[in-house]
Image (spheres, rainbow, N blue to C red):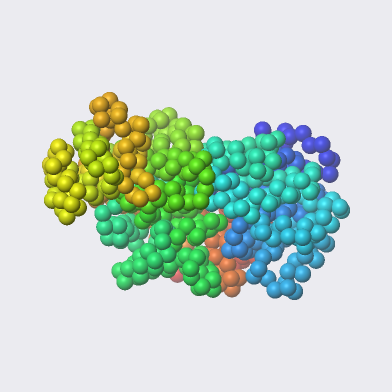
Amino acid sequence: MALGHVLIDSPALFLIAELPSILREVFGYDAFRGPQADIIAHVHAGGDALVLMPTGGGKSLCYQIPAIARQRAGHGTTLVISPLIALMHDQVGALHEAGVEAAFLNSTLSHEEASAVEKRLLKGELTLLYAAPERVTTPRFLALLDAMFERGSLSLFAIDEAHCVSQWGHDFRPEYRAVTVLHQRYPGVPRVALTATADALTRADIVERLQLEDAQQFVSSFDRPNIRYTIVEKKDALTQLMRFIEREHTGEAGIVYCQSRKKVEDVADKLVQAGVSALPYHAGLDPEVRQRHQDRFLREDGLVMVATIAFGMGIDKPDVRFVAHLDMPKNIEGYYQETGRAGRDGQDANAWMAYGLQDVVNQRRMIDESPADDTFKQVMRGKLDALLSLAESTDCRRVRLLAYFDERYAGPSGLHTFCGNCDNCLQPPALWDGTEAARKLLSCIYRIQQMSGLSFGAGHVMDILRGKVTDKVTQHGHATLSTFGIASDLSETQLRGVLRQLIALGALSVDEFSTLQLTASSRAVLKGEVQINLRLSVSQPADKRARNLRSTDKATHPELDAAAQTRLSALKAWRAEVAREHNLPAYVIFHDATLAAIASQAPRNLEDLQGISGIGLKKLEAYGRDVLRVVGSASVTD
């Protein structure tokens, strides 16, 4: 569907042919990206939509531009349901910078400030209002919406992070379920639900929960080609992480995810001791400390945030150069969402994860011990198995990752099996045939259970296989088993790799007591019907050719000559001052790409500046002369 070819029933609607002018004049971009044009046209015309678009793909414009257009056409205010206070603050700040009337209602406002926003809302002075789902469904807020609906000034409902409504999503929030009241209470007001991550099951649940059965679905490619995926076997995870940061991301912004609060604190302390600027973030910190750390991460350069998954949703920082996982997430959706916070600016970024057998055991235990019903647990186990399969894979990570979201990877030149930007593609792992080792391992578990009727954990089973006489082996008489010592030629690392692969294949399971159990699929492996190929080691350091993701020069725009680099440095220093004055992250003022374009083109007047991507009319008016002054001064001092 092309812009200008959409039938519009209401003559009051802002002319759809003028939507590109909003993109240019307000946001400073010359062209829509991917499916943005179709989505915006559909939503602007009053259609309901479910939008799946990867992080950094421009989801916000898919409701912000229709909100502006519909408000100009007399349809009133767009309500944006957003999950986090920090996200509301930054998005409203960015809209103000672009000259759009927007506000938020949340707990950071005083009673007087909130009342002032409500008055502006009822007067029709706001184009967009941001609020959390908990507030939206309160009687007071619904009374405001009732008044707006009666006078026809409710334009659009935008439900951001819509995966939160689904129990199958990676970040289910029960309060999101209540927003269904909007459709029931205000029929005819169009709705757009947006998310960066949802598999087929989650999408179906979003549609059902939000009653979007008649909505048009827009599913963009999930591929983030600028992100390099690397997954390594966990040995000394903290040392591995430090080596990774030192070799590839010294002085750059990144996020490190850990499972526990204690680990977050420990890792942050160790990074600081190693000379890395790092801060902890988790739900156990004092709220003021947590907010201060998040603000510093958004506003300062080169900080590393060590966090639980409590950190990240709605983080719009474009220059996060890496996301590292020291513990395996619960599922691929969580992994994709978290890694997607790297490289939002389209520049090269790295997604690095260290994982081990204990990660699998811990995640399975959490599933098994949860109070959920058996159906839910079974689905969660399947999602965990899919992530384990991704971690254990010896083929292209990207192909497997996209296949999980029902997308076939097109690849360079139409290839479907090689992305050229993951560890397995850049350095195909050396493999060994672990079929016989797998048979020995399963046979050992079978004979242990046959002998004593008991089940044991991975460490004990490996001791038996490797012929180690321990107190437990002696206590249970397991040295007499026919499988005692039959894998003495294999290292513990190799056996752990076999264990993980068997769990990934479903030929072995781990119960709530962390003991190993045979499954229905074990028989095929025992009979030699399944071949198991394993990498020799996924923890060996990469060779020098693939080690550095980017050179330091590339991080500072190698396309710029020395004079342009000087201008860029001056522009960044000026931007930092403006951002501090406005209490906003620097990228809200101008993105790095916009500053680089200014530095490259060295504009001499406002007309030259107007043609640069990312500079709308409001920003041109507010900052144009200052930018020209900075460029001129830097050019003189070259």
Q: Residue 150 at what x, y percent from top left?
A: 86, 52
Position of 65 with respect to 116 (left or right) is left
Which residue is at 42% across, 64% downward?
261
> Of 597 and 441, which appears nearest the observer?
441
Looking at the image, residue 294 lies above or below residue 354: below
Q: Is residue 351 visible?
A: no
Position of 540 with respect to 278 (left or right) is left
Looking at the image, residue 97 lies above or below residue 391: below
For the N terminus, the image quarter is: top right
Quadrant location of residue 280?
A: bottom left
For the C terminus, the image quarter is: bottom left
Q: Residue furthest right?
A: 151
Q: Residue 63 at what x, y percent from top left?
A: 67, 48
Which residue is at 37% across, 64% downward?
263
> Of 220 and 597, which appears nearest the observer?
220
Q: Residue 617 at what x, y percent from top left?
A: 67, 57
Q: Is residue 266 visible?
A: yes
Position of 173 with respect to 215 (left or right) is left
Q: Residue 304 at what x, y percent from top left?
A: 41, 64
Quadrant location of residue 520?
A: top left
Looking at the image, residue 542 lies above or below residue 379: below
